[in-house]
């Protein structure tokens, strides 16, 4: 029989996985606010993670939901070259969620928080019509080297750290087959269920930018086709404002793509490269840097893959073809 | 005809009410993270504000929803004696919300943010089954004078800044009569719809604590009956941990209560004092301080009302009676 749910029982469960003591905590959870001592410059991000919008309980385990809700936020910190330090959790719980479920949920989130030495410093609990998670995360960053979008120049090398299109294939096969998909599509399912935020890579890229023009950097959450124009400041508003007309020539041979992306596209009669370009939620880092910065970056970070160059053409080509009708994801489209 | 909703149109609407430039912003909205320059010590709070849990669209105007979602968070900063500086917004939107609605929502939130010179530094948008708002707020605080709970001593004067029970009456009459209730219960409706966070009072109390034992302080969100034991560290876990057995003798003459609380209780055949003790969501500040600190506090802050003394009895009396079966609010009870 499930134990009755109360604010106190939920908080006691949570306390097993999120220690109250942390170097930066002056006052921990349980007061009106947490009070935190922190470095002068902070990078801050908030992400919603909502049932049946961002995840389904049908094939996400509770631990995977807890893990991914935090991972997608950490990825934003990684994209700024920051080191994640703390987070808050807004948690709306529908009927039917019990303490064993929450225990597993907190264990998944807590393991990732422990890996990055992050403190859960506060939050809020409520009943809600569906599982609703809102996390705000922040991290330390060097104010003299901020990795942002829109900092690229024509001639820069484009690169990616992480995989392209794998999480989108994972979503497709999990939607179609449920948990059975994990057997035949292990890498794709893992990419969708438990993406790995590229924190160390982000910090390394930030260091590389200290005595040179810093790389431009972002994380790929809506697909390369949608996110690359953002990296280059090509969105209509930005372009006119900054008088820029950057573009890109992507070189994405099929051999560079994750094997499960190629296999899936072939089974479905789709172009694997287009699938990789559309693929959101990989939480890979996408960036560009001066050409002479590329070789030392590749030595230090072997996972870093060059994928082309920044141009001043105002449009994006991929393997010699215009990017054309390949689109990413808009929640409101 | 309503304009089509897209991420871009929502962000353009929001930009009218939340300026991008702020003394503390190094990188504003639109990148993976905001990057903020902050004082060393920060107080931080996260609150959920959910449709049909915390508010109803039936009698909340969009501007009032935007206002209150931010106000309840600012109140937590006030309860630490902090000065609010910035916030993030997670916003889940159901079908049927259009741009004019959002324009009004952002205008209500933006006016309160402007009043406190707060920057909206980031957030996330999504579709959701119901209106879902999650705000995280930051404020500057002096590390040498933290106003927290559990800092009281027997003999301390108890005080309140703000009203007791008014918001609960507002909720009851708005639930019963809808918008018509605003005519006959203006103060109660305003207390429920647009509570005023006591920021200046919190900062003044923090200053008073600099050269003396600081007052204990919290905001009353679940009702005095539930929140006073928290202020005094009387919750079962805390009491045993700290070996404390504080209590209180409250003196709450009916004449001290808001007239609409008295009128409502009389109409319903209820005890007005019990209604005031049960009343949550007033976002009044509840605190205690050494007796000799009280007169100067009252001079500086005429709205501050003494409501009794802290005892070492381990239980709470009100007007000579045990607090007994007067309870506040638990979302999961």
Image (cartoon, coloured by chain):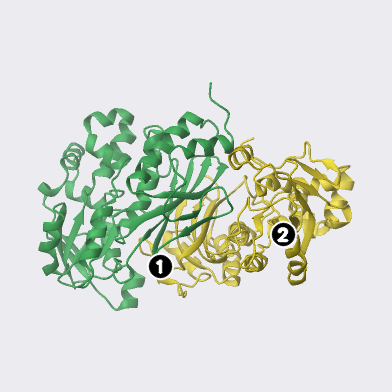
Chain colours: A green, B yellow
Q: Nearer the viewer, mark 2 or mark 1?
A: 2
Residue A40 bears which disc, if any?
1
Q: Residue at x 55, y 34 (%)?
A: A9
Q: Are marks 2 and 1 in contact (CB under 8 Å)?
A: no
Residue B57 left/right relative to A164: right
Q: Residue at x 53, y 70 (%)?
A: B17
Q: As rendered, which of B33 and A35 lies closer to the eye?
A: A35
Residue B190 bears which disc, if any?
none
Residue topped by disc 2: B290
Task: Give the structural element (helix, strand or loop) at label 1.
Answer: loop
Q: Is the N terminus of chain B in the top left, top right, bottom left or bottom right quadrant?
A: bottom right
Residue A259: x, y in percent? 15, 41
Res B174 visible: yes
Q: As rendered, which of B297 and A284 lies closer to the eye?
A: B297
Residue A263 left/right relative to B78: left
Residue A145: x, y in percent? 28, 69
Mark 2 → mark 1, Cα distance in angstroms: 35 Å
Res A326 visible: no
**Disc 2 is attached to a residue of which chain?**
B
Q: Is the C terminus of chain B in the top left, top right, bottom left or bottom right quadrant?
A: top right
How many C-alpha atoms fall within 10 Å of the one at disc 2: few (<14), some, or many (≥20)? many
Residue B308: x, y in percent? 80, 53
How many C-alpha atoms fall within 10 Å of the one at disc 1: few (<14), some, or many (≥20)? some
Task: Note whether A184 is above or below A197 in the view shown.
Answer: above
Task: Give the structural element (helix, strand or loop) at label 2.
Answer: loop
Residue A310 lies in quadrant: bottom left
Residue B250: x, y in percent? 80, 49
Q: As rendered, which of A259 and B244 lies closer to the eye?
A: B244
Q: Residue at x 16, y 51 (%)?
A: A303
């Amino acid at each position: 029989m499930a134990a009755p749910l109360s604010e106190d029982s939920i908080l006691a469960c949570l306390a097993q996985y999120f220690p109250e003591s942390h170097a930066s905590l002056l006052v921990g959870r349980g007061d009106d606010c947490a009070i935190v001592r922190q470095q002068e410059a902070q990078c801050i991000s908030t992400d919603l993670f909502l049932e049946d919008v961002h995840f389904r309980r049908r094939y996400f385990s509770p631990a995977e939901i807890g893990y991914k809700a935090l991972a997608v936020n950490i990825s934003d910190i990684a994209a700024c070259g920051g080191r994640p330090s703390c987070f808050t959790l807004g948690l709306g719980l529908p009927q039917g969620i019990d303490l064993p479920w929450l225990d597993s949920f907190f264990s998944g989130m807590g393991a990732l928080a422990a890996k990055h030495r992050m403190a859960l410093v506060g939050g809020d609990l409520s009943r809600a019509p569906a599982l609703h998670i809102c996390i705000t995360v922040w991290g330390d960053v060097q104010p003299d080297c901020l990795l942002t979008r829109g900092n690229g120049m024509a001639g820069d090398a484009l690169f990616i750290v992480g995989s392209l299109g794998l999480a989108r294939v994972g979503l497709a096969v999990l939607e179609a087959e449920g948990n059975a998909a994990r057997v035949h599509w292990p890498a794709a399912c893992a990419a969708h269920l438990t993406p790995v935020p590229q924190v160390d890579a982000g910090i390394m890229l930030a260091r590389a930018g200290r005595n040179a023009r810093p790389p431009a950097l972002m994380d790929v959450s809506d697909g390369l086709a949608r996110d690359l124009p953002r990296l280059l400041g090509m969105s209509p508003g930005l372009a006119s404002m900054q008088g820029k007309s950057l573009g890109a020539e992507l070189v994405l041979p099929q051999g560079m793509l994750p094997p499960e992306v190629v296999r899936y596209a072939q089974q479905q009669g789709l172009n694997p490269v287009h699938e990789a370009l559309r693929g959101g939620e990989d939480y890979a880092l996408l960036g560009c840097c001066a050409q002479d910065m590329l070789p030392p970056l590749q030595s230090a970070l072997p996972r870093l893959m060059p994928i082309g160059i920044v141009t001043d053409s105002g449009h994006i080509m991929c393997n010699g073809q215009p990017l054309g009708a390949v689109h990413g994801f808009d929640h409101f489209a």
